[in-house]
Amino acid sequence: MNETRAVKWIGQSVERLEDPPLVTGRGRFAGDINFPNQLHMRIVRSNHAHGRILSIDTDAARKLPGVVAVWTSADIPEVPPIDFREGPIEKLAPYRQPVLATGMVRYVGDPVAAVFAEDAYVAEDAADLVTMEIQELPPLLSAKDAPAEFSPGRHTEADILRQGYGDIDAAFQKAHTIVELQLSVGRHSGVPLETRGAIGRYDAARDMLQLHGAAKVPHRNQELIARMLKRKLTSVNVFESHVGGGFGIRGELYPEDILVCVAAMRLGRPVKWIEDRREHLIAANHSRNQHHKVRAAVAADGEILAIDDLIFHDQGAYVRTHATRVAMMTCGVLPGPYRVPLAYRAVCHFRLTNKTPAATYRAPGRFETSFVRERLVDAIAHKLKLDPIEVRKRNAVTVAEMPFKRPLEALGEEIHFDSGDYHKLLDRMLKEVEWEKLNADLARRRANGEMVGVGFAMFVEKAGLGPKDGVNILVDSTGAIEVVTGGASLGQGFETVMAQVAAEMLGVDYQRVSVIHGQTDRISHGIGAHASRATVMTASATRVAALNLREKALAAAAELLQAPVSALDIVNGEVVRTDRAGGPSISLGQVAAAHGKLEAEGWHHAEHQVYPYGNHLAVVKVDPGTGGVTVERYVIAYDIGRAINPTLVKGQIAGGCAQGLGGALLEEFTYNDNGDPLSVTFADYLLPTVREVPDIEIILTEDAPSPLNPLGIKGAGESGINGVGAAIASAIDNAIGIPGAVTQLPVTPQRLKAIIDAKR
């Protein structure tokens, strides 16, 4: 198959195909989806963090004009708790969340009842009329505290996770120095512009159940709904709308998604639910909340021989669809780009508390571990009086060691770094920022009384989660090309990237390619868009499908043109002869019309994920009077392997960095002693604005294409957020002149001022 094309689309920063409906106000988000005769659902939520349900009174709500039904758990006994995305897990099954609370409430926001009404305002009024009597129980609010009873015979430590290799005790006995730290990452999460929404619809004539709304994993949600409701897989369809931000927390299956489906079937009418902002802040998945007691065995020259980490993971009230995925990945990825040759041990206490349940948020497990690991490296450099950059260079895996394997797990796969030159990228960044001059300028400013400093972090990402992805491509008689995928679009430019790949392989204009995604009735297989997998997996499958279609098209055209296939090529949508000038040609549309059907599928299988990598550098200024931090400069160097659309990659990196700054400096879900959430509006849950986010400088390189896919591509979606907490913490230490001062994220003004005042 000849891959030479007249137009090269891969590597070009072409305009996004997704944008016209969005910028002209014609987007179709969950709130825009309506069906005739639909009902509106409102959830009645617990106002108690922990308690036993004594009674729920729904009489007044049921009598309100316009109310069709009010449900408690007693009304839907056949509906099981929300199951796990990957399938049943017996050990964790008792900790799943019921669709409506049964007997107990376990966090403020726990769904207790559901109201269905003709009008959204009537539904809200009716929900206010539902009353409940709760016998309050003491809340458990920290994973570091001793476990308590979850249910009879079960306590709140749902699991203990372990990963490691080598003889940890022997390694520490050999150490020249042992460095120990206690570090915490606060509870925060994705806060997309669009809150969650779900619309259930049941077609009784065809016995077809539909769920409309954001669905980053539509096929997985289809499977989960079918399993929970005991329906045939083919009788459930999930449809993805436009999405106003995903970030890992949108598109998972929540109680509300199941409720609208069950109600649509039982009540015989479409049912719509749209979350308000307060609900989102107390009910959608939280993330991050971890405490680490970490120590490193270090040689005299700064080589990290071994790492031992004791982790307390705050899961919140229930185990949701991701099960222990974030905690297990935390255990596996903590060593990052560093060799750690002798031994490694991570023990994670996976504990439930009376807070909102937790799951993934952009770079789950990596934002946390990069903070822990890079704090450890800075502490090693300080204790041994070594240059922090030199300590990183000494420990980073070299290009000669690639592919580098370590017996640890990430998302069920053993970690294999596929390619990379960490030292080259580090040197590139230091040269770009004029490292020596930068430090000299900051030192001069500090001498003049300013609190300014620079911080640095190295990281390795993971991307391209397998095991496989499939794509169908077809050409119609007009020459239009349709790419049908099981992928999903969360705003990352998915349609544009797939169109670029298909267009280059086929020899057509990318604007003639339509990409269909997020529709389970169009393709039977899909894993969606998560774990930075879409470009690696779906684009690779698109390439195969396009080449297969190209082969079919040339074979069909050869018959029509009475020419050998070897003498034909496709240029700008036309099949032309290459062996002589001025020969006959035929369009792909004409080939499709003559052939009757021009269609092909393609699959990409991956045994291992790919591992892109990068560096973050932050320059900050601290106000000693308030503890406020201004980020003056932020630089990210990242090796993408190969960029399909460099501008889209840079956009992903910049957006992720802004979110990381929020988690590093501002965003935190806090609770009082009763378990009441204190961050339920944007007055208390503080997001970074354009004022707090500097222009992000991005150094994008393609020095280490992945050998694991023909395009050499790696993922980018989580690179911008990964190292932010680590780099900001390091920069603040440098600014205030207190090595190791920052041990907790976010570094709020109150916390930082307390550190500065304590020094004084």
Image (cartoon, rainbow, N blue to C red):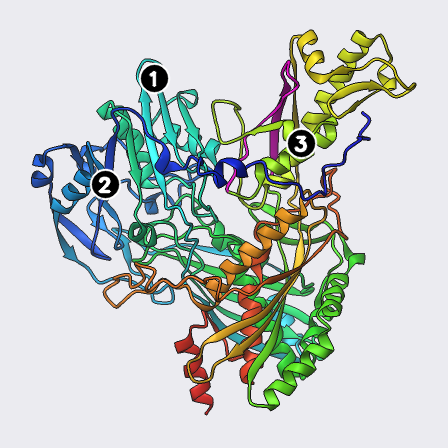
The verdict on residue 482 being magenta is yes
The residue carrying pointer 2 sits among few (fewer than 14), some (14 to 19) or many (20 or more) residues within 10 Å by Cα, namely many
Query: Left or right: where does residue 646 sit relative to residue 557?
Result: left
Residue 229: image quadrant is top left
Which disc number belongs to residue 712?
none
| Mark 2 / mark 1, whichever is N-terminal | 2
Q: Residue at x 74, y 37 (%)?
A: 710
> Badge 1 is on which residue?
207
Task: Of the two numbered discs 1 and 3 on the same chain, state the one appearing first in sequence.
Answer: 1
Q: Residue at x 32, y 22 (%)?
A: 202
Work out whether 204 lies above or below 345. above
In this rendering, the label closer to the viewer, 1 or 3: 3
The residue beneath circle 2 is: 42
Q: What amino acid is labelled 2 in the image?
A: Arg
599 or 180, nearer to the observer: 599
Q: Secondary structure at mark 2?
A: strand
Q: Quadrant of residue 126?
A: top left
**Residue 401 picture location, percent across and down:** 78, 57
| 10 Å crowding of disc 1: few (<14), some (14-19), many (20+) | few
Q: Residue furthest bottom?
A: 760
Quarter containing the N terminus: top right
Q: Is 735 left, or right, of 260 in this rendering?
A: right
Taking the view exactly as shown, the residue that stands out farthest to the front is 24
Q: As drawn, is 68 to the left or to the right of 412?
A: left
Q: Which residues are magenta?
A: 466-490
Q: Residue at image x 69%, y 70%?
A: 392
For numbered disc 3, what is the local secondary structure?
Answer: helix
Residue 722 position in % (x across, y down)? 57, 59
Q: Earlier along the polypeptide chain: callout 3 or callout 2? A: 2
Q: Which residue is mark 3?
A: 510
Q: Residue furthest right?
A: 580
